[in-house]
Image: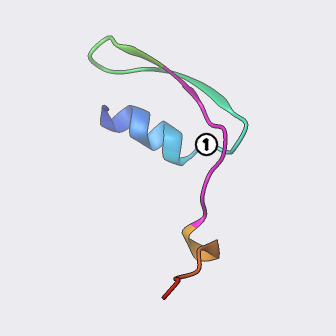
Amino acid sequence: MPQEVLSAVFNAKAGEVLKVNAQNGDKYFVDIVALNNRMNLKLMK
């Protein structure tokens, strides 16, 4: 996935629908359903 698309995804919030045009002309439609916050994850032993 192109960097500009990844940047848009990582800056998005849950529930957003992204429509991103990549520099190479490809179009990406991304539906952000849920995000995992690494700070909220617990390590299990």
**Image vertical order of residue 32 relative to residue 42, above or below:** above
Residue span colored magenta: 29-37
Q: Residue at x 60, y 64 (%)?
A: 37
Residue 41 within the segment the image draws in magenta: no
Q: For the N terminus, which image quadrant?
A: top left
Scheme of image coloration: rainbow
Residue on which the image places disc 1: 12
The image quadrant that residue 23 belongs to is top left
Residue 45 relative to residue 16: left or right: left
Say which element carries label 1.
loop
Residue furthest toward the right?
A: 15
**Image vertical order of residue 43 relative to residue 36, above or below:** below
Q: Within 10 Å of the Cα at label 1, are there few (<14), some (14-19), or many (20+) other Cα atoms?
A: some
Q: Residue at x 64, y 74 (%)?
A: 40
The image quadrant that residue 18 belongs to is top right
The image quadrant that residue 33 belongs to is top right
Residue 18 relative to residue 25: left or right: right
Residue 4 relative to residue 42: left or right: left
Give whichever of 23, 32 is nearer the camera: 32
Amino acid type, mark 1:
Ala
Q: Position of residue 25 (x, y in %)?
A: 32, 11
Residue furthest toward the left?
A: 24
**Image vertical order of residue 14 relative to residue 23, above or below:** below
**Image vertical order of residue 16 relative to residue 45, above or below:** above
Q: Position of residue 6 (x, y in %)?
A: 41, 40
Q: Position of residue 24 (x, y in %)?
A: 26, 16
Residue furthest toward the bottom?
A: 45
Q: Main secondary structure of the magenta part?
A: loop
